[in-house]
Amino acid sequence: MGVFADEWGNGWTAASASAVEGYARAVTAYLGMRLEIGDHLKAVLKADPDMPMAHVLKGYFGRFFATTPMEKMAAQAAKRARALIEEGDSSEQERAHLRALETWLDGEMEAAIAIWEAILIDHPRDVMAIKLVQYNQFYLGEGRAMRDSLARVQHAWDEATPGYGFILGSYAFAYEESGLYEQADRLGRRAVEINPADIWAAHAVAHVCEMTSRPAEGERFLSGLEPHWDGVHNFRHHAQWHRGLFLLELGRYDAVLDHYDAKVWTEDAVDYLDISNGAGLLWRLAEQGVDVGDRWRVLADLSAARTDEHLLAFADAHFMQALLADGRDHEAAALRRSMAEAADGPGSQARVTREVGLALADAMMALSRGAPADAVAVLWPKRGELRHLGGSWAQRDFFDRLLVRAALDAGAHAEARAALSERLQAQPKSRWNWLRQADLLESEGHDADALDAKRRAVELLDAA
Ligand SMILES: [Fe+2]
């Protein structure tokens, strides 16, 4: 074994330089969200079955799936990496990665982040450490921390660094999640210029369009880039989900359903992100009075098989909604019980479930059984904490809309007024916000003002 540098200057223990080149290929495929990530990793392990970092990478990739079987596979990979590292002459960087993987597998996301951040102080071009901080901060709802982390490594990156565009795209998304939309837009568009197939960067720009209520522009932007997404893994469904949100905001309900069937929920849609795409879009459609047919069924089937996982509180929330919407009340109750048990355990997601996940589940269950006042009572005090469920602002907007809908249905005017006031301050060009504002004003008997709010919603469509 020797030490060979990857294209970012990180030295990894391996049998040959070509094994480390393979490692870099797998990492680059991961950055590009390519289907061939696994093939590249297999090639590395075939070329060098004893490369410690290849096993750590296998563990990382397995953990990203957030499923019980892949979690077990990741734990096996970590075990193998530990044996290799203990018997070999590994670097502190490799040892730190192993500790971070083990800590992450223990569910301690903040502690794992601290290890990756420590790696980045000495190795600011350690791409996996950069991305793992992003992923984990994302699922803790920490947009500002995502941005700060990327800011700290910028000194080591420029346009000549391999994969620079991918880091720029990540930075764009981190800017977006921390509410700085102009910077996000600029960086994201530059990354797409560098590589039109960089779907993460395109996705960052889509988020900017979503948060600044520019649905027509967002729809055009994504549809123009779609031809570049051949070979992208199921993240492309999520990019298409954003297109679905744009079509929805444009009031093109039939187009949303067609788009859902053709691009958002396709046969290879299986994982938690797919389910969250499906549940988030179907709920929004149904909330606006659109008949979504039996589309919940497949989401509920997949969710029913995952009621005991609890790897991400964000995923549990979407599993719950899918079960409830398909009328699977027993399985929804089983998920609720299992969440409560998990909430008593250790780890970051147990804490999130305890502090906000259970309240959200209860609100969904209350709304589903026709008790919107109960939904408001349980979720209103937690509204400011929904961020901790992780996911993006655009994804969590589902939960906030759910609360507004519950408040309107319950006749909880004060809460509806306050929530809509906040929403209209943040997104004054959101058609949905104005439609719900019209509902509120109408239910309070302010017919002229309600008509004015409806007119504003129509004007937004005309202007789009
Ligand atoms: Fe997104």
Image (tube, helix red, strand yellow):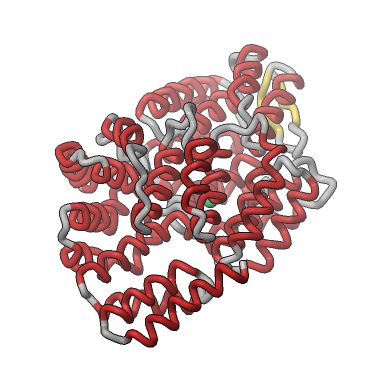
Tell me: 248 left or right of 348: right
Q: For residue 106, which quarter of the picture?
A: top left
Quadrant for the N terminus in the image: top right
Task: Give the left or right position of residue 415, taking residue 433 as reference.
Answer: left
**Quadrant housing residue 345:** top left
Q: Is residue 427 above or below residue 448?
A: above
Q: Is residue 310 above or below residue 460?
A: above
Q: From this viewpoint, is residue 148 visible? A: no
The front one of 18 and 259 is 259
Q: Residue at x 48, y 37 (%)?
A: 261
Residue 67 drawn at (x, y percent): 38, 31
Q: Position of residue 388 (x, y in %)?
A: 38, 58
Residue 19 spot, x, y in % from top left: 70, 20
Mark yes or no: residue 299 visible: yes
Q: Quadrant of the C terminus?
A: bottom right
Instruction: Report the residue that reaches farthest toward the right.
Output: 160
Decide if residue 5 is on the left or right side of residue 404: right
| Front residue of this view, candidates 360 and 62 | 360
The image quarter containing residue 338 is top left
What residue sits 61% from the left and 47% below the top? Answer: 130
Q: Is residue 11 left or right of residue 368?
A: right
How many numbered callouts? 0
User: Which of the two residues, 88 or 422, is positioned nearer the viewer here?
Assistant: 422
Image point (67%, 21%), residue name: 14
Q: In the displayed structure, would residue 159 be above or below residue 335?
A: below
- Residue pictured at 61% horizontal, 27% vertical: 35
